[in-house]
Amino acid sequence: MSYVYDLSMQSRAEKRTKASKRIGSSIRKDAIHPADYNRYKLPYACEDCSHFKSENESCTLGMPTEQHLRRNQKRSYELSGKVALCRLQEID
Ligand code: SF4
């Protein structure tokens, strides 16, 4: 193992340490213009999706629904102007 190789491995370890200290949301939220939010009936919640099972508020694809439930989406939009759109949502 060469000296140069050791240095490069060390810098990767340092980068990993710096990356692990970053604090951020684990889910990406998208902004919706307030005019569009008020004008259109946007299907942004699990309740609008074909994969939603209302009996136990679960997803037939096994995705976590908590962030996408209408009550949480509305709350998120009122606080930040953003909602967590599900990329697997299907609408009949
Ligand atoms: S696919 Fe996405 S929007 Fe549809 S029920 Fe599952 S988590 Fe909710």
Image: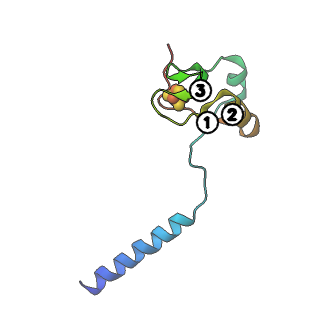
Q: Which mark is residue 72?
A: 2
How crowded pointer 1 is (Cα within 10 Å; few <14, some 14-19, many 20+) is rated as few
Q: Quadrant of residue 39?
A: top right
Task: Say if 15 sits above or below 48 in the image.
Answer: below
Q: Secondary structure at mark 2?
A: helix
In the picture as drawn, the residue positioned furthest to the top comes out as 92
Mark 1 and mark 2: span between their CA atoms?
Answer: 7 Å
Q: Which mark is residue 66?
A: 1
In the picture as drawn, the residue positioned furthest to the front comes out as 55
The residue to which callout 3 is attached is 56
How crowded pointer 2 is (Cα within 10 Å; few <14, some 14-19, many 20+) is rated as some
Mark 1 and mark 3: span between their CA atoms?
Answer: 12 Å
Q: Secondary structure at mark 1?
A: helix
In this picture, residue 6 sits left or right of residue 11: left
In this picture, residue 1 sits left or right of residue 70: left
Badge 2 vs badge 3, beta-carbon distance below 8 Å: no
At x 42%, y 73%, the residue is 13
User: What's the residue type where badge 3 is placed?
Assistant: Asn
At x 75%, y 39%, the residue is 79
User: What's the residue type where badge 2 is placed?
Assistant: Asn
Task: Say if 22 sits above or below 10 in the image.
Answer: above
Q: Quadrant of residue 12?
A: bottom left
Badge 1 vs badge 2, beta-carbon distance below 8 Å: yes
How crowded pointer 3 is (Cα within 10 Å; few <14, some 14-19, many 20+) is rated as few
User: What's the residue type where badge 1 is placed?
Assistant: Glu
Of marks 1 and 3, which one's residue comes earlier in the chain? 3
Percent across and percent down for residue 58 are: 55, 29
Disc number lying in front (1 or 3):
3
